[in-house]
Image (spheres, coloured by chain):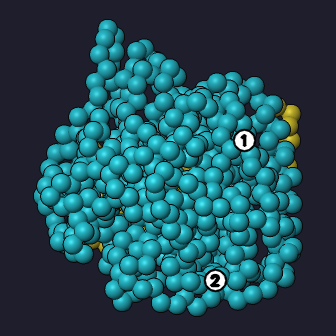
Amino acid sequence: MTPTLPGIQLAPLAGAVPAWRAAVDARQWRAGCEAAARAGGRLAALWASDERDRGRGFCVRALLVLYEGLVCLELLVPEELQTYPDLSDVFACAARMQRAAHDLVGVIPEGASDRRKWLRHGAWPENAFPLRREFKAEQKYSIEDDGYPFVRVEGEGVHEIPVGPVHAGTIEPGHFRFSIVGEKVLRLEERLGYKHKGIEKRFESMTLEEGARLAGRVSGDSTVAYAWAYAMALEGMTGARPSARALHLRALLLERERVANHLGDLGYLGNDCALAFGFSQFWRLKEDVLRSNARAFGHRNLMDRVVPGGVACDVDGASAQAMVAEASQLQDELRTLRSIYYDHAGLQDRCITTGRLLPLTAARLGIVGLAARASGHAMDARVHPGFAPYDKLQPKLASHRNGDVAARIVVRFEEAFESLRLQRLILQNLPQGALRAPLGEAVEGAFGIGWIEGWRGEVLVALEAGRDGRVRRCHPHDPSWQNWPALEHAVIGNIVPDFPLINKSFNLSYAGADL
Amino acid sequence: MQKILFQIARTGIISERAPAADESLRRIAGRLNDEVLRLLGRALAIRHVDAGSCNGCELEIHALNGPTYNLEGLGIKFVASPRHADLLLVTGPVSRNMEVALKRTYDATPEPKLVVAIGDCGCDGGVFGENYASRGRVANVIPVDVAVPGCPPEPAAILQGILTAVSAAKS
C-alpha cells in the first residue's frame, strides 16, 4: 500500500523493505514532513550530499518511517542558496542531524534555532566541508580549540560538573556537562563527535562490496545489524535476492547479537547498583554465547558474517542441535537471574522511577528502539509487515509503559527470552538454499535503503552507487542519533550518582552517531 | 539472598589460567628496567582510553573484568583516572577530535608508564586508516610499548598484551 503525502509523487524503491522516494521542492519538504508527523510517522534519518558535479547543487534527504514503510524525501538545494527549510520544529530529533549535515556538507537549515556545530570540533575549519567532492580525504588542518558554546544554567547555588571526553570506566568518549544544585541535575548537555573519524568520506574511496566491511564497523556492538542493513541496501539496488536460508541465518546472527548485548547490559546494570553478583553471572553467560559464536561462525562478535548477497557462514545439523540446547539452558539461567533481579529490593529501589522518560516526551523526541518500547511505544522493524524472514517467525514485541531504568531492564529480559525462542525456531526449521546469491551490477546513481532492528534500535543504511561499482555516497544511521537527546531529558531531576545507571540503561553508541 | 548464595555455589569458580607473555607483540623493548616491570606486574593499574574505536574492542575489554578472565585475580585493575594508572590501554584509530585528550591523558599518567595499543586500528589504523579526521595508529600520537592486533582481539589476546607489557624483556 503506497502512503499518501499531499502533492508528493512517490516512486517505489526496489528492495527487501517497502520503501518509496520522491523529489520534492522546499514547500513539499515541509508539508510532507508535517503530514507524516500528523499521521504518526517519524523521522528516521536526515543527511546531505554534494551534487554539484552533476550540476544539481546539494541534496538533502529526509527518511521517514510511516505505517506503510519508508519514504525518502529528496530536496535539491541550489549551490548559491545553500539553505533548506528547518525540520527541527516538526521532528525534534532533526536538530543534531541538521547540524551534522552542515558540518560535513555546508547546507543550512533555514529557521533552525540551534545552529551550533556538532561533529566539527577543531580538526577542520568552519569554511571547509569534508563531504564536498573537492575536499581531499587526506587533507589535514592544524587542530584548533573546540570553543563549543555550552548552554549556561544560572541561579543561586547552580554549579557545573564537566565529565569527559575520557570517562572513568571502559566507555566510549564523549563530554557531559551537568548543571546541578546540590546533588540534583537541573540540566545535562551532551557534547559528542569525539569519535568522528571520517567514515562517510572513507566509504567514497571504496567499492560497493568493500563498503560492507566498513559498514560492519560503524558501531562494533551492532555489527550484524549494520552489515545486514548495508547488504539490504546494496541488494535492493542490484536486484540480488538472498536465499531463504541466507535470510534465516542472518536473523539467527542478529538475534545472537541481541542476546549477547542484552546479557552484557543486564550485567552492567546490576553492577551499577552495586550488585557485582549480577555482573559476574551475566558476563559468564555472555562469554558462553560469544564462545559458541566463535565455534559455530568463526567470530565471537560475528563481524563480517553477513555479506552482500547472503552470509559467509553456515550451520550444520550438529551445530544447530548444540545451539538449540544452549538456548534452552540459557533460558533457564535467565529465569533464575530474572527472579533474583526482580526480588532484589536494593536493585529495584535504585531502578524504579529512576531516569524516567514518559511516553509523551519519548514521542516528542522521536526516540526509537529498546528505549522507545520501554516508554510505551510499539515499534520494532522486525514486526513490520513483509519483513523476511521475520514475517514467518512472528516475533513478539516487548514493551513497558513506565519509561524508567526498571522498564528498560524488563524490556531487555523480555527481548532476550523472545530472541532465544526465535533462535530455536530458526535452527529447527532452517530452509535450504544458497549461502550467497550473485550480486549483479549496480548502475551509476542506483539508490538503496537498508533497515534493520538491531538490539539498540533501528539501523539504517542509505547507499548510492557511483561509477564502476564504487560507492558514491553512503549514510549509515544509528538509533543513538534519536536517543541521545532523550538521555538529556531522562536525567532531569535525578541525582548525579544515578547518571551512570541511567546512561547504561540506554547504552547508546558514541561511535555510531559520531561517524 | 538465599537464591544468590545458591547461585554462587552452583556456579563455582570458572576463572581460567592467564596466557603467557608474547614478546613478538612488543614494539619498544628495554624502556623500563626489569625491577620496575616486576613491581608493576604484581599490582597493575590500567586506564582505558577509547581514542576513536568502533566500540568492538571495548566489548572484549569488558569481558576481561568478567569471571572467566578474572583480571583482578591477577592483581590488575582498571582505574578511573590516568593519575592513578601505570598503563594506558588505548583502542581505536586516534580520531583527530580525540588527539588532544589522548595526549593529555598520557601526560597525566605518572612515570614509569606503559602503553598498550589494542586492535587492528590501534596497530595500523585498520579499516578507517588516516584522513582529515583520523590520525590512524596509536603510535602516531603517543609512544606504544605493546600492540595487540585483531578485529577485535579476543580477551585472552588483550590480556596477553597487558602481561607482555609488564613482563621483563628477555633480550
Task: Specify the amino acid type for callout 1.
Answer: Ser
Residue B127 spot, x, y in % from top left: 39, 74
Task: Identify the chain of the residue marked 1, using the numbered disc in the image.
Answer: A
Q: Image check: A380 left or right of A439?
A: right
Name the quadrant of the N terminus of chain A. Answer: bottom right
Task: Specify the amino acid type for callout 2.
Answer: Arg
Q: Point out which mark residue A241 bears.
A: 2
* Few, some or many residues within 10 Å of mark 1 (<14, 14–19, 20+): many
Q: List the residue tagged with mark 1.
A: A399
Q: Nearer the viewer, mark 1 or mark 2?
A: 2
Q: Residue furthest front?
A: A7
Q: Between A246 and A147, which is closer to the camera in this rendering?
A: A246
* Few, some or many residues within 10 Å of mark 2 (<14, 14–19, 20+): many
Residue B24 spot, x, y in % from top left: 42, 79
Name the quadrant of the C terminus of chain A. Answer: bottom left
Q: Identify the colour of chain A in the image.
A: cyan
Q: Between A158 and B100, which is closer to the camera in this rendering?
A: A158
Q: Is residue A302 above or below residue B79?
A: below
Chain ID, yellow in image = B
